Image (tube, rainbow, N blue to C red):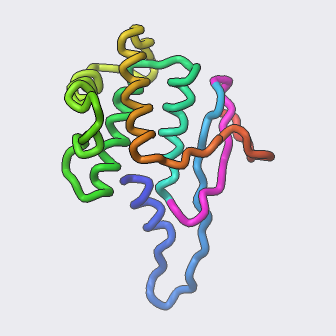
Amino acid sequence: MFFNVMCNELGRTKEGQEKVNIKRYFLHRPDTEGVFTLRATGDTPYFHHVAILAELRKCSQGGTLYTYHFNALRSILEKTASFFGHADLSICLAGLEDEVLYNRALNLLSHGKYAINEPVEMVDDNKELFRKILDDVLGRFQFSLPELVSEAAPQRAKS
C-alpha cells in the first residue's frame, strides 16, 4: 500500500502544470552478496507482490527457508484476497485439499516474533508444510512468476 500511494503521489500533477512522466522500478536482491538489481516494471506499481512470490518459490525450491517466509506468504495471500474483494485470506485456501491445516499453519506460524535481521531457519516439518501451501496456492491461482535473475543487463547498485 505504501509503495502504491507513493507511486500515485509522485505521478500526480497540480492543476495547470505539465504532466510528469515517471518510470517505476523494482529493487531486487537476486543473491545474498548484497548486490541489488533495478528493474523497470512498466505501468504497474504492484510488481513487488509477484516478485515476492517468485522469491518465495525460489527459496522453497532450493534456497533456505526462514520463519519469516510464512509472514511474507500470509501477506501476499491477504493482498490477493483483498484484490478479489474479500476481507480474509481463507478465500485463497478455499477448496484446497488441506485447507484447514493451511489456514491454521498460516495463522500460527506467521505471528511469531521473527526478526528479519536475525533469521531463524525453519524446522524440516515446517519447510515441507510451507512448500505444500505455496505449491497449492501457486497451482490454484497460476501466477505468472518471472525469473527475475535471468534477465540481461540489469542496473546494479551496491547495498
> In front here: 36 or 69?
69
Q: Position of residue 94 (x, y in %)?
A: 24, 41
Which residue of the protein is positioned furthest toward the right in this rendering? 153
Q: Is residue 35 magenta?
A: yes
> In front here: 82 or 95?
95
Name the residue at 44% across, 88% down. 15
Name the residue at 20% across, 45% down. 88
The quadrant in which residue 138 appears is: top left
Q: Is residue 88 left or right of residue 136?
A: left
Name the residue at 62% across, 64% down. 23
Which residue of the protein is positioned furthest toward the bottom in this rendering? 16
Q: How many marks?
A: 0
Which stretch appears magenta? 32-44
> In front here: 133 or 63?
133
Q: Is residue 54 above or below residue 68?
A: below
Quarter of the image for the C terminus: give it. top right
Q: Position of residue 78 (x, y in %)?
A: 29, 44
Name the residue at 44% across, 59% down. 6
Q: Is residue 3 left or right of residue 83?
A: right
Q: Is residue 36 above or below residue 15?
A: above
Q: Is residue 155 magenta?
A: no
Q: Position of residue 145 (x, y in %)?
A: 56, 45
Q: Position of residue 5 (x, y in %)?
A: 39, 61
